[in-house]
Amino acid sequence: MHVHPDDPSLAVDTSPDAPPEGERWSTWDGATHGPTPRPDWVITDLGAVEQDLGVLKTGKEADVHVVRRWVPDGTDHPARDCLMAAKRFRSAERRLFHRDAGYLEGRRVRRSREMRAMARRTEFGRELISGQWAYAEFEALIALTRLGLPVPYPVQQDGSEMLMEFIGSDGVAAPRLAAARPEPSALPGLFEQARETLTRLAAEGWAHGDLSAYNILLHEGRLVFIDWPQIVDIIGNPQGFDFLHRDTHNLCSWFASKGLDVDEDGFFGDLVAAATSRW
Ligand SMILES: Nc1ncnc2c1ncn2[C@@H]1O[C@H](COP(=O)(O)OP(=O)(O)O)[C@@H](O)[C@H]1O
Ligand SMILES: [Mg+2]
């Protein structure tokens, strides 16, 4: 095997300071950090280590892993540790990003050489695209966190990897709404949570762009909205209202299929009103 000496990930680290096998030093230092105030559980210590605990889900466009970060210091009792979800966007040729087409349009990329590389899907271009999606999702989560909306806290982003708050309890990820079995009596309250979030989002001029019961987690009775790289500017995107309509329809259909009486047209009308109220 040819090992490139400059690539630390390929070299066997024999120095006594190296973390134990299967672990890596915390990637915090070299990454772009999430918004302040930072939640207490975020570990920023330079001496922290991380371990990949495995895949939560592999997808066409990204894989989501569970990563544990902790401070390996015997004097720190109880040892501080936290779980994060690591979303890694693919750059592989075979990744056919169904979202690339409609969404990259309208997103400004400063250097046209990069725009051309992305358009031609060169290797460099594909890497840029995966980094762009990680960056887009990270930026969206920062903005949504600042608005106080129920999304995972974005911890950091570096290239095509984004680390965020792990939504779950005792190491078990919260179920997607699509797989959760909420009591019928809980449905009106859950729908109300979704309505509030979508209305505030629309009032900011945004639609999720890929909303469905698969991109909503149900955690301790609360909805947490995930999967934001394609967040849509309702007014600025030529298909903005179509995306808003599809989001609304997907959401309402799920609740209707569970037996809730939802007024989809009325809800969509409210969202359009919220989105256009500033103009
Ligand atoms: N922050 C998180 N906490 C817990 N589970 C998550 C988190 N983010 C994603 N997941 C899990 O990983 C799956 C894929 O994540 P998602 O962002 O929807 O990516 P994609 O659908 O593009 O593959 C989700 O459906 C969910 O089950
Ligand atoms: Mg998803």
Image (cartoon, grey):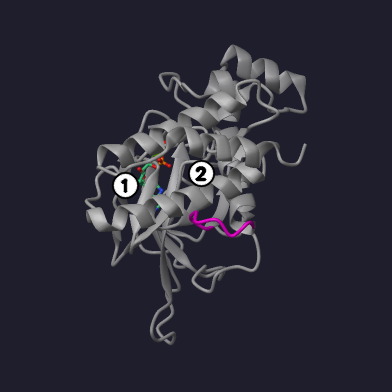
Region of the chain picked out in magenta, as a range: 147-153
Tag on residue 176?
A: 1
Q: Residue at (56%, 68%) from the top-left corner?
A: 44
Horizontally, residue 72 falls left or right of residue 159, namely left
Q: Amino acid at mark 2?
A: Glu
Question: Could you say which is closer to the camera, residue 204 or residue 229?
Answer: 204
Q: Amino acid at mark 1?
A: Arg
Numbered disc in front, either 1 or 2: 1
Tag on residue 124?
A: none
Q: Is mark 1 within 8 Å of ligand 1?
A: yes
Tag on residue 161?
A: 2
Q: Residue at (55%, 69%) from the top-left corner?
A: 39
Above or below 115: residue 261: below
Question: Could you say which is closer to the camera, residue 245 or residue 233?
Answer: 245
Could you tell me residue 73's position as x and y percent? 44, 79
Q: Residue at (52%, 70%) from the top-left corner?
A: 47
Q: Main secondary structure of the magenta part?
A: loop
Image quadrant in which the C terminus is located:
top right
State the CA–CA distance, disc 1 to disc 2: 22 Å
Could you tell me residue 228's position as x and y percent? 52, 40
- Which tag, 1 or 2, sits closer to the chain's start? 2
Above or below 126: residue 14: below
